[in-house]
């Protein structure tokens, strides 16, 4: 496991998402109301590019003809077959017991923490006044 | 010690034949260069007059993004209208050796004005060659014909057949009558004469008939299932009307109509034939025609809870009957490396992904 700086926190506004590459793998990074989440960009069904799909809520029903949408902006729907996943956990909605897309923890850390290290070779001017998004993989 | 490096990626890369790719027009005017002025004006003035129920509905799979893969939209036009995107997203990325084009719209299959239908058929056949097959030789066209004018359809097949970039004859299997009817036989005569299989695609247009055998459905989920029941009507009609006794070399590929239903239909047809064979005269048992004359494309593939159950059904059907298809760029696209959820032996894989298609279609 190593830590990867994947984005500046400020460049991902609430409701936005982007795909970043970590160790050769594509990961979708999401900001839901100021909280950050990351899931693999590979749908476990047929390997579709999951995060190119629609960001949506979940349609719930108490019976025929009764519908409601809850948790708007917290689900991603695969662009191929429409499988829905909870962005917070990676859990699938159709078969939560056995199907899950890999989720990663996203940490927000200030820049001055990140530039500290045991080795000092060459110094670059780094903008340390901002926060960064970190994924461990 | 030096260890010889094996090119694992090349060995693992599966090249395959795709039995179902849908090309689309970027805009209606793409068709103009291939239509005589008289019919171009007709199209602009009167438009099409289609066999279609529930007027104003999309006659198309439409779960999301008008039935398309959300990631398959080019900068301009609908999915399937941009060759470059089709190449990078599918043909190159997934290793397509040959891809059969199934051009569903504006080829005259659904048009009621038969003279206009003939002009459209001709235009769509030219369009396939000029827009798709010439710039991308991995693609193969289908001779799209209006089945309701069988005499014209047969002439169009004869006219195009020498051009081997056309690998099959395509028309609506949801015709005005069940397609075993003798009014369609000139098409079969021409297809057999030119050694071209029929490629029958039941998904999308229902030809003005209610899309399910028990009436118009309420939900898209019901309608999607109707592709399979439509194919059952196609198979029973072709077999019981005696088409294969008259045209013993005719080959039929059922595209996007499923296949898991076929073994059970065969058992049922044989049972009824044994009891009621005096009603019609068939030379052979129904399952023998099913076994010898029909092939099935795989998409949209079934995904049972125990994936290996699908393998058992294919054992009943025959592994030599299946042709892999992706249905690119539609939403229910199947990926060649992920569609089958159980282990296929190398021999089964070779059959489904290449050899069966090569046995039916002539790729030159």
Image: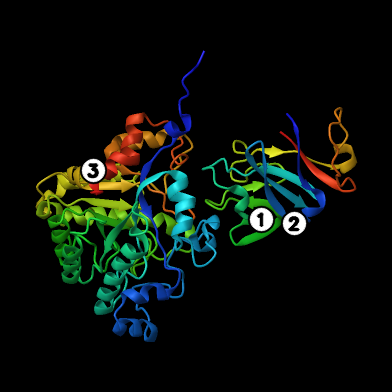
Q: Are marks 2 and 1 in contact (CB under 8 Å)?
A: yes
Residue highlighted by disc 2 = A15
- Please give left or right for residue A96 compared with residue B350 in the image: right
Colour mapping? rainbow
Q: Is residue B146 shown above or below B223?
A: below
10 Å crowding of disc 2: few (<14), some (14-19), many (20+): some
Q: Nearer the viewer, residue B245 or B198?
A: B198
Residue highlighted by disc 1 = A55
Residue at 39% across, 57% down = B226
Residue at 37% across, 67% down = B105
Picture coordinates of residue A96 (x, y %)? 63, 40
Which SS class for mark 1? strand
- Please give left or right for residue B248 compared with residue B55 in the image: left
Residue highlighted by disc 3 = B359
Picture coordinates of residue B229 (x, y %)? 34, 55
Q: Chain of mark 2?
A: A
* Residue most extreme to the top: B1
Q: Nearer the viewer, residue B338 or B57?
A: B338
Q: Are marks 3 and 1 in contact (CB under 8 Å)?
A: no
10 Å crowding of disc 1: few (<14), some (14-19), many (20+): some
Q: CA distance from mark 3 to mark 2?
A: 52 Å
Q: Is residue A57 shown above or below B123?
A: above
Residue at 73% across, 55% down = A16
């Amino acid at each position: 496991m190593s830590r990867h700086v994947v984005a500046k926190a400020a460049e991902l506004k609430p409701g936005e998402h982007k795909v970043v590459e970590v160790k050769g793998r594509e990961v979708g990074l999401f900001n839901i109301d100021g909280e950050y989440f990351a899931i693999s960009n590979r749908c476990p069904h047929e390997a579709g590019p999951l995060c190119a799909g629609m960001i949506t809520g979940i349609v719930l029903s108490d019976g025929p003809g009764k519908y409601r949408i809850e948790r708007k902006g917290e689900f991603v729907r695969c662009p191929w077959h429409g499988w829905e996943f909870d962005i917070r956990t990676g859990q699938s909605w159709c078969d939560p017991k056995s199907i899950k897309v890999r989720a990663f923890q996203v940490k927000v850390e200030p820049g001055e923490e990140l530039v500290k290290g045991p080795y000092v070779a060459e110094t670059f001017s780094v903008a340390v006044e901002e926060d960064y998004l970190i994924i461990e993989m | 010690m030096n260890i010889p490096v094996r090119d694992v990626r090349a060995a693992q890369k599966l090249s395959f034949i795709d039995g179902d790719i849908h090309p689309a027009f970027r805009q209606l005017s793409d068709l103009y260069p291939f239509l005589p002025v008289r019919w171009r004006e007709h199209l602009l003035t009167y438009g099409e007059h289609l066999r279609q129920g529930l007027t104003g509905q999309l006659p198309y799979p439409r779960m999301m993004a008008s039935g398309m893969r959300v990631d398959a939209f080019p900068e301009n036009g609908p999915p399937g209208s941009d060759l470059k995107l089709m190449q990078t997203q599918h043909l190159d990325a997934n290793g397509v050796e040959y891809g059969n084009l199934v051009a569903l719209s504006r080829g005259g299959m659904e048009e009621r004005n038969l003279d206009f239908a003939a002009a459209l058929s001709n235009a769509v056949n030219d369009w396939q060659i000029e827009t798709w097959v010439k710039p991308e030789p991995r693609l193969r066209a289908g001779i799209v014909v209006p089945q309701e004018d069988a005499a014209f359809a047969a002439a169009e097949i004869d006219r195009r057949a020498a051009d081997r970039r056309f690998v099959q004859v395509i028309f609506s299997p949801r015709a005005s009558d069940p397609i075993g009817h003798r009014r369609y036989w000139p098409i079969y005569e021409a297809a057999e004469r030119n050694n071209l299989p029929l490629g029958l695609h039941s998904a999308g247009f229902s030809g003005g008939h209610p899309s399910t055998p028990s009436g118009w459905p309420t939900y898209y989920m019901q309608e999607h299932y109707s592709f399979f029941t439509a194919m059952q009507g196609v198979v029973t009609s072709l077999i019981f009307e005696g088409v294969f006794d008259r045209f013993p070399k005719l080959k039929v590929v059922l595209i996007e109509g499923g296949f898991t239903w076929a073994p059970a239909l065969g058992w049922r047809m044989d049972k009824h034939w044994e009891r009621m064979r005096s009603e019609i005269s068939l030379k052979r048992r129904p399952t023998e025609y099913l076994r010898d004359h029909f092939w099935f494309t795989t998409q949209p593939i079934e995904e049972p809870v125990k994936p290996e159950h699908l393998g058992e059904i294919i054992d009943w059907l025959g592994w030599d009957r299946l042709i892999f298809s992706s249905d690119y760029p539609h939403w229910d696209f199947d990926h060649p490396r992920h569609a089958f959820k159980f282990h296929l032996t190398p021999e089964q894989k070779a059959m489904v992904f290449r050899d069966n298609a090569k046995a039916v279609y002539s790729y030159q």
